[in-house]
Image: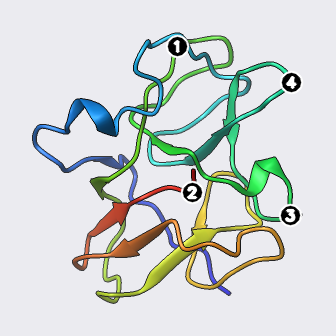
């Protein structure tokens, strides 16, 4: 299993995402930790804050609810998207399925202990299509 290397500034590639692509339509979610644009995230049930997803165990943290649209610090409002394309990497193999990695916030090209569900796939050498795991 190998993590997909994110480019320096991952960004939303879907020109006008559908409103339904927003994970939190009310915009009331805040980051429970520092999160970088392009990281796979989940919403923790106990405090309703957003954290970096990780596949180290088969628990809520392994579910990627959305991908972070921008970098934010702990306590700042955060926007997560699903069903969107993201400028994400370089020289990726088209069609590669992506899963929640054991590295917090990262995506990998193979399933992990907790990240068993495909949450994205590569659509071009530089873009991914993030579906999420809801």
Label 1 to label 4: alpha-carbon separation: 18 Å
Question: Residue 127 location, x and y as percent?
Answer: 27, 67
The residue positioned 73% from the left and 23% from the top of the image is 32
Label 2 to label 1: alpha-carbon separation: 21 Å
Label 3 to label 2: alpha-carbon separation: 13 Å
Q: Mark 1 points at which residue?
A: 77
Question: Residue 15 location, x and y as percent?
Answer: 10, 43
**Image position of 96 (left or right of 46):** left
Upstream in sequence: badge 2 or badge 4: 4
The residue positioned 68% from the left and 81% from the top of the image is 111
For residue 133, the mark is 2
Q: Nearer the viewer, mark 1 or mark 4?
A: 4
Residue 124's place in the image compared with 120, above or below, is: below
Q: Residues within 10 Å of mark 4 (few under 14, many from 20)?
A: few
**Image position of 42 (left or right of 6):** right
For residue 58, the mark is 3
Label 3 to label 1: alpha-carbon separation: 27 Å
Residue 105's place in the image compared with 110, above or below, is: above
For residue 28, the mark is none
Q: Which of marks 3 and 1 is in front?
A: 3
Question: Residue 97 location, x and y as percent?
Answer: 46, 82
SS at badge 3: loop
**Image position of 77 (left or right of 79):** right
SS at badge 4: loop
Q: Quadrant of the N terminus?
A: bottom right
Upstream in sequence: badge 1 or badge 4: 4
For residue 46, the mark is 4
The residue positioned 62% from the left and 72% from the top of the image is 117
Residue 69's place in the image compared with 33, above or below, is: below
Dots 2, 4 in contact, CB < 8 A? no
Upstream in sequence: badge 3 or badge 4: 4
């Amino acid at each position: 299993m190998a993590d997909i290397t994110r480019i320096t500034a991952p960004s939303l590639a879907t020109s006008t995402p559908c409103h339904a692509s927003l994970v939190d339509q009310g915009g009331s979610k805040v980051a429970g930790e520092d999160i970088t644009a392009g990281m796979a995230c989940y919403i923790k049930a106990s405090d309703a804050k957003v954290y970096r997803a990780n596949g180290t165990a088969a628990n809520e943290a392994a579910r990627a609810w959305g991908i972070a649209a921008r970098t934010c610090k702990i306590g700042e409002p955060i926007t997560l998207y699903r069903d969107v394309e993201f400028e994400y990497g370089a020289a990726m193999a088209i069609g590669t399925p992506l899963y929640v990695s054991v590295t917090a916030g990262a995506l990998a090209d193979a399933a992990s202990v907790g990240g068993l569900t495909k949450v994205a796939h590569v659509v071009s050498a530089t873009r991914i299509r993030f579906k999420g795991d809801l």
